[in-house]
Image (tube, rainbow, N blue to C red):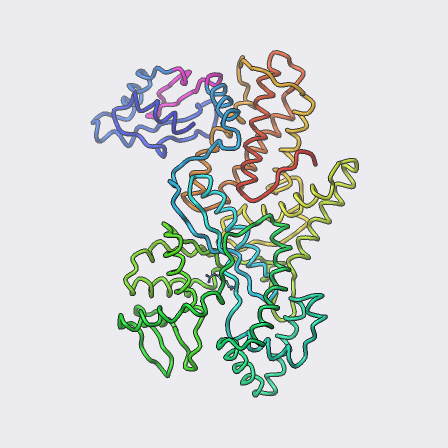
Amino acid sequence: MKATIVQVLQQFCPIPLDENMLESPVHTHLGDWALPCFPFAKELRKSPIVIAEDIAKAIDHPLIRQAAAVNGYVNIFLDRTTIASSLLQTILEQSSSYGASNEGNEETITIDLSSPNIAKPFSMGHLRSTVIGNSIALLLEKIGFKIVKINYIGDWGTQFGKLLTAYRKWGNEEEVKIAPIETLLRLYIRFHEEAEQNDSLNDEGRAAFKALEDGDSEALALWKWFKTESLKEFQRIYDLLGVTFDSYNGEAYYNDKMGPIVDELAEKGLLIESDGALIVQLDEGMPPCLIKKSDGATLYATRDLTAALDRKATYDFVKSLYVVGNEQSLHFTQFKKVLHKMGHEWSECIQHMPFGLILKDGKKMSTRKGKIVLLEEVLNDAIALAQSTIEAKNPDLLNKTEVAEAIGVGAIIFSDLKQHRKHDIEFDLASMLQTEGETGPYVQYANARAHSVLRKAGETNAFMIEGVNDFEWAIVRMLGLFPHTVKRATDELDPSIVAKYAVDLAQAFNSFYGNVQVLSDSAHRFYRIALVTCVTIVLKESLRLLGMQAPEEM
Ligand code: ARG
């Protein structure tokens, strides 16, 4: 809507306008939009007051009811009826594709997300990566990009030598089958405890990893089994979150593909020997990038370099995003630099998207050192809480389990996405699940309430608008802002813009619902039904873009 108004105003304005010039007045009696004329004074050699008067006088358009010049501003009052009726028509016609565009031109963007480590618990960090990455993927898809979601599983590295050793010494098959990650993690912790007393264990671990790298079939079979069992556990979390991936090529996939990269680095004269290890020297003040350890083992960075080249060759991306915690910033700066030094200009398209921590009572919520928070437990707690609220408030609801899942999981997703990803977030299940305030359930509840109106209304019909009151206008304004919201969220790769928008739209709907007789006033009935229908369309689509469900009854 803003864009349309700018286009309209342009016809009456001697200077090129853009959307940012239009301000939204704090008080509605000052108009729906205001155009400050101060920036034009120099070029037009007139006072802003005179410019505003000239523009206000010239304006003549069906979308604009009135234009008033006040102290160098042109205050614009829109024709609510015309705007509301064309906007509602548009939304009803376009339905869930309202707000979509083809800005992305079918070009490909890869998103590296989730990427947990096998035999380790799925951490809070992995949850954030999954939720943020998934929403960014949905947003970019909405504006016409082709998205490839890659779950770069951490399934390789020296820790697997340790794990193999520990399993052979103290493990048993049954236990792993029953609780794979818990058991494997315990073995891993025990390895570290015992290795402190007995250093020869470390040698055994290294030898076991070497055997794995060299393709020893017994080691490989065990490793594969650990991986399958771990992935089964992760899959339960992905099912709950409703997230899918296009590729699971993780670190191990690149194990036999690193040779050519190391060769290329050497050919280009970038590889330097340092204490027996191979490194690439980077800029002043930045630690070098380690490519090969002195024992010949490759590293995390070596695999990421290889993966980046492979992704470029496979997908020819225009952008490659990595949704990974703050603490890996140096790693991403380094490996991007190495690609740049290799002459790959597309390294510029690689973007690390860091995010903050999840805190519990102000401290990092961690999965290490025995403080194991199995994420699945957290999700199930949220679902159980939602379920007990339903039992108390709406015991006759059909498919209670599904709805509880949508609310519980949605609450966690929303509390993660409602702030900019770089902020740390405080994890507090009870407050996430509130139906008041800026929460997922608040938005979902507004949508369910709108649906209950529609259920009561029964039939819909063609509508004529005879006046738009302030409550309705607040909704129309919000609905009209949706495409602009999607645009901002995709420009800034920031789902919190959509989350905040959803709260605002839900709020506008709730005050309308509390103050306007939707169905009993026959003159406005069909128009109001259309308005409520549009609210459900846009709320559902906003929630979908965050990766959440929109139950029609709660
Ligand atoms: N597995 C890593 C971890 O848990 C995250 C991997 C992120 N992606 C990447 N391409 N490095 O810390």
Quadrant location of the N terminus in the rendered image: top left
Give the residue drawn at x 67%, y 67%.
Answer: 182
| Viewer-closest of 333 and 106 | 106
Residue 488 pos. (x, y %): 43, 40
The front one of 448 and 107 is: 107
Give the camera-side residue of 468 and 120: 120
Q: Quadrant of residue 42?
A: top left
Quadrant in the picture for residue 33: top left
Question: Any magenta on residue 426?
Answer: no
Location of residue 200 (image quadrant): bottom right
Question: Which image quarter holds the C terminus?
Answer: top right
Residue sitting at the far front: 217
Residue 257, position as x, y percentages in the image: 41, 68
Residue depicted at x 39% and y 55%: 314
Residue at image location 51% in from the left, 30% down from the top: 478
Residue 143: x, y in percent? 43, 39
Q: Main secondary structure of the magenta part?
A: strand
Above or below, 74 against 200 in this view is: above
In the image, residue 88 above or below residue 442: above
Could you tell me residue 189's position as x and y percent?
63, 75
Whether residue 371 sits left or right of residue 267 in the image: it is right
In the image, residue 76 lies in the stretch drawn in magenta: yes
Magenta extent: 62-82
